[in-house]
Amino acid sequence: MMARSSAVRQESPANGRYHDRASDRWVVKVLPGSQHVSADPDGQELISTVLGSCVAACVHDPLLGVGGMNHFMLPHDDEGLWSGASLALRYGNHAMDALINGLLAAGADKRRLECKIFGGGNVVNGMSGVGDGNAEFAREYAQAEGLNVVAFDLGGDRGRRIVFDPYTGQAWRRFLSRKLVDDVARAERKLRQPPPLRARDTSIELF
């Protein structure tokens, strides 16, 4: 087995990482509400995710060979009510800002960034507007921020598996089978449940 690459990584601890024998490369699986930024000079790392109604942005600086992917579940939140970076990244506005900032921290230049945005399928029964809302947010964010989007693959009623090469910027999309779409939809529905509220401090301060 090959040694782990020397990539500069920025990811949630929940993300999985494994060695793919077919490609002989390391693959980082980006989970909902997380991201991964790679600056691997050897180009030995791929990033992957599975999407239903969620959206993933694959962003790349072609000059430096630096790239990253996020995975967000809902379009917008102004107050960070999920309380914590990993949970805040479930929202598109936090997820996109964090990914761009992560790439800039790795040396990328925003003017050179190329984006490919995937997902937003209407796959969750009873929540048909979630995918459309995520897709609409992705388009509006890209336009507002002046991002160079070279590919949009959004909407429809099918799930997607995305594999992204952060070194070259190449991305592969495969539609999921109906069974896998149902599994993804169940997982997304569960993850959309808000975290339990923290107990309020009921103590009284005496003056």
Image (tube, grey):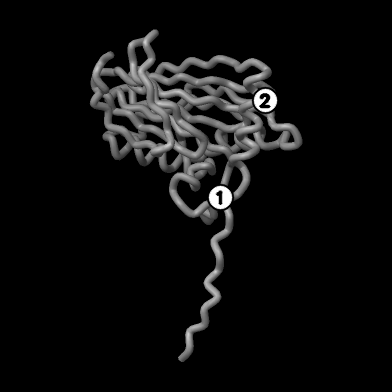
Please say if 12 is above or below 19.
Answer: below
Please say if 99 is above or below 38.
Answer: below
The residue drawn where x is 59% and y is 40% is 191
Query: Which residue is at the far top?
Result: 22
Please say if 28 is above or below 188.
Answer: above
Q: Position of residue 174 (x, y in %)?
A: 55, 15
Q: Is residue 132 left or right of residue 104?
A: right
Under mark 2, the amino acid is Asp
Q: Secondary structure at mark 2?
A: helix
Q: Position of residue 122 (x, y in %)?
A: 69, 29
Q: Is residue 25 left or right of residue 16?
A: left
The residue drawn where x is 23% and y is 26% is 6
The label nearer to you, 1 versus 2, is: 2
Along the line of sight, the residue nearer the viewer: 53 or 107: 53
Q: From the image, tell me which residue sits under label 2.
A: 182
Measure the alpha-carbon separation of dots 1 and 2. Answer: 27 Å
The quadrant of the picture occupied by the N terminus is: top left
The mark that comes first in sequence, 1 or 2, is 1
Q: Position of residue 92 (x, y in %)?
A: 53, 41
Which mark, by number, is residue 19? none
Query: Which residue is at the far right?
Result: 126
Along the line of sight, the residue nearer the viewer: 12 or 113: 12
Q: Secondary structure at mark 1?
A: loop
Q: Badge 2 local density, few (<14 within 10 Å), some, or many (20+)?
A: some
Which mark, by number, is residue 77? 1
The residue drawn where x is 34% and y is 35% is 103
Q: Badge 1 local density, few (<14 within 10 Å), some, or many (20+)?
A: some
Please say if 73 is above or below 175.
Answer: below
Under mark 1, the amino acid is Asp
The residue drawn where x is 76% and y is 36% is 126
Query: Which residue is at the far bottom?
Result: 207
